[in-house]
Amino acid sequence: MTLFSTILEEKATYRRLLDLRGDLAQMSLNVLQRIIQSLPAKHQTMFGVALLRLSARSSLLPSCFILGGVERESDACTCGGFGDIYKGTFRGHRVCVKMVRVCGPSCMDYARTFKMFSKEAGVWSQVRHPNVLPFYGVHLDGKYRRMCLVSPWMENGNICEYLSINPHANRLSLARDVAHGLTHLHYKNIIHGDLKGPNVLISSSGRACLADFGLAYMSAPGILEWTSVRSSTHGCGTVRWNAPELIESDKGIASKNSDVYAFGCVCYEIFVDAVPFHEITHDLSVILAIVKGKKPSKPSDNSKPFTSWGLTDNIWNLMEQCWDSNPQHRPTAGNASQQLPHPPAYSRKKAQENEEATSRSQLRAAVMEDNEGGIPLALMEVLREVGW
């Protein structure tokens, strides 16, 4: 770890590392991914950023990401602008196969798509937490080896769908799950960038898990500024969940503060059962409202949110703190998590929850074990090549 840290801290050797291609780039990616797994969180960002940059430049992924034996259904469950969602199976487990769509026939189109794909896979792979959707790996599908992200299949759908079918679910516990997941991302210096109800999935045991890391990135303040850590592909989420600073500036970049603003909006979805600014039809009008400093409307005291769904004045005050127009005045994700009260004791299918977590952990470990080996030799090859 010390040798590789020195390589990443020195401009010349770091550049030589990023210029590697072919087998040497592959070995370097494998070494970086292996090292990251054993590092404390404070060191993971530097190595994670290096992995993302080398992957994008070399058009390669760590070998342990690639899954064999994934089977998917022929018809997509959902079709979106950037890809299609299929049900599938992997080693006896039901999985979600997210197939990325390449928008254009040229090599440049493929390179651009791979860069976005590798960033999502790379960032997502660094996170393991009960309230973050697990990353199983990458499936290269069919004759043309189309790029797919593989994760557990969540039968309960997203949090909005789940609450429409289960209106009496414990909404406070779901809000705490989202807060815990976001706190963990920020602890690892990962910005989600697109937090909203449709991107929060519900496990079979009723736990909320953050998903969809297409706009996520690793924030590395003060580390190797010359490397332009923040990619130009970073978007700004969806309008109704966007913090004012993302809307008011063409150069707005998602941050921990804007994630917290979005968390307040997800709490609105959970406790009010509506999207933020639901009374405003057009997104352009929503943008104007946000720029003018307006916040999502508060339901009346005798409405269902307050009488049946767990909303309290304290929770509403927390949501308003998250929506503060000054990003620096918003609470951190950890502070927001602490402000949410503990729910009363209730059954959360604890045995099923433990079995679920164990099964997924064992599957990830098995995949990693299948793809390990040869790391010490690879490390020596990389060190020689970068001139160490």
Image (tube, rainbow, N blue to C red):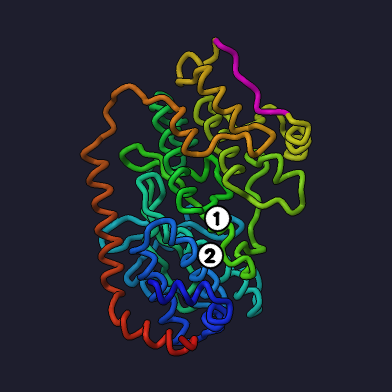
Q: Is residue 137 left or right of residue 252?
A: left
Residue at mark 2: 119
Query: In the rendered image, is residue 336 in sight?
Result: yes
Dot 2 alpha-carbon crowd within 10 angstroms: few under 14, some 14 to 19, many 20 or more: many
Say if mark 2 contacts mark 1, CB within 8 Å: yes
Would you place residue 118 above or below residue 195 in this image? below
Residue at mark 1: 216
Magenta stretch: includes residue 286: no
Residue placed at 57% from the left, 46% from the top? 256
Q: Point out residue 83 in the picture as x, y percentages from the top left corner.
A: 55, 60
Query: In the rendered image, is residue 101 in sight?
Result: no
Q: Main secondary structure of the magenta part?
A: loop
Displayed quadrant of residue 214:
bottom right
Residue placed at 58% from the left, 39% from the top? 262
Magenta stretch: includes residue 295: yes
Q: Amino acid at mark 1?
A: Ala
Q: Amino acid at mark 2?
A: Lys
Q: Secondary structure at mark 2?
A: helix
Q: Which residues are magenta?
A: 294-301
